[in-house]
Amino acid sequence: MSVELTTLPNGFRIVTEPMPGVSSAAVGLWIEAGARHEQEAQNGIAHFLEHMAFKGTARRTALQIAEEIEDVGGHINAYTSREMTAYYARVLRPDVGLALDVLADIVLNPRFEPREIEVERGVILQEIGQALDTPDDIIFDWLQETAYPSQPIGRSILGPSARVAGFGQQDLRAFVADHYRPGQTILSAAGAVDHDMLVRLAEPLFGHLAPSPALLPAPARFANGERRETRMLEQAHFALAIEGPSYRAPEFYTSQVYTGALGGSMSSRLFQRLREDRGLCYTVFAQSSAYCDTGAVTIYAGTGAEQIAELAALTIEELKRSAEDMSEPEIARARAQMKAGLLMGLESPAQRAERLAKLLSIWGRVPDISEAIARIDAVDVAGVRHHAEGLLAQSGMALALYGPIERAPRLAELSESLAA
């Protein structure tokens, strides 16, 4: 079976991938509008809108939305990222049409009743409060804000409480009108699905929507900066970011393999050096995040107040050493882990549907899995070391610290050590 794509005259895209032997299907609407599409006064509204979609439509109450999917044993959910908002359901084969009807209803016909807005406002304010009380969550928001200051991509997805407290019905409708357009919406499904049937079901639901051009987000600009928040916690939280490639950049896969070898597993350099050899932390990892026009190599660790300086110094040391002696066995292991993760994910209809939508959004097509595997296999030691050297040469680096951080070095000190 293969991926099939149909684009309606108004730009609405329908992409499917049947999975033989699977009895369930994942069906979802991925909309190319997230937190970085917000104006400053709107910060948090994309996430607020995601919540409000489940609070009732012209045809269904909030309870009916949940009951119709759960009555057939399925589940429905949503999420907001910086570049997309997704609404999706998992159901059995006979209920694909029902799932699509419910998803279309909550996205196209939300009522935004004032009472429900107030109820959900309280829920979101509690969510924001919970994030603020979770150091290893909030530090990544601070790191993002420090790396991309005064830019939509640098703002919190949840938004500040003061903004969320003021959103009303007209604010929600305005964001929908600006960004929930057929050319920015992808219907993606995988598993027990039939492409032609899904197209027939989708055409009367979405085909009448008027096409209009997308409102593109402002280009990202990575900056040099630090944020330090001292608080009496059990651990000092350390997060460091260096600008990396976007997901359209040629070195995207190199960066993913590099961060896997640096800090993506128990056998990685940072885990072995900082945790296994020195006992400085319980959690440490490196990751490469990517957006349409920028990216970041991020390192995170939590440690004690007395150990933060040593942990920071060893982290810089490992960054420098990775450009000099990253070995073929390390790269081979990271490649194997990346390929295994990719292939294992394809066993899940939900992950496969999400992959279809994201790749279609990025490339305008869905590359075959063999293309991704070939690009991973093409990453070699020379390329990884060259990528590491490029990171060391970056002028921009962001640092976020939270907790008992009195002994933590300043960003200028880390930059000097990295350049030495």
Image (tube, rainbow, N blue to C red):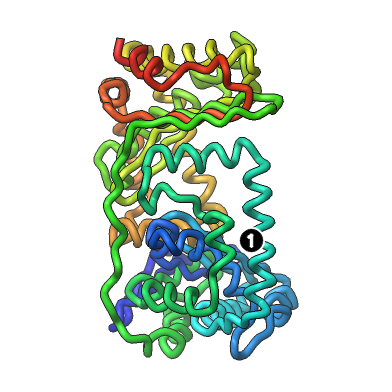
Q: Nearer the viewer, residue 33 or 328?
A: 33
Above or below, 84 against 344 in this view is below
Quarter of the picture containing the C terminus is top left
Image position, residue 348 (x, y; %): 57, 55
Percent position (x, y) of residue 242?
36, 30
Residue at x-position 40% and y-position 62%? 38
Residue at 47% from the left image edge and 82% from the top image edge:
197
Residue 159, position as x, y percentages in the image: 52, 56
From this view, report whether residue 61 is shown above or below residue 235.
below
Which residue position holds label 1?
Answer: 124
Instruction: Tell me the quadrant of the picture where the N terminus can be found.
Output: bottom left
Circle 1: residue type: Ile
Neighbours of disc 1 within 10 Å: few (<14), some (14-19), many (20+): many
Residue 34 horizontal side relative to residue 305, left or right: left
Quarter of the rendering containing residue 231: top right
Badge 1 marks a residue whose secondary structure is helix
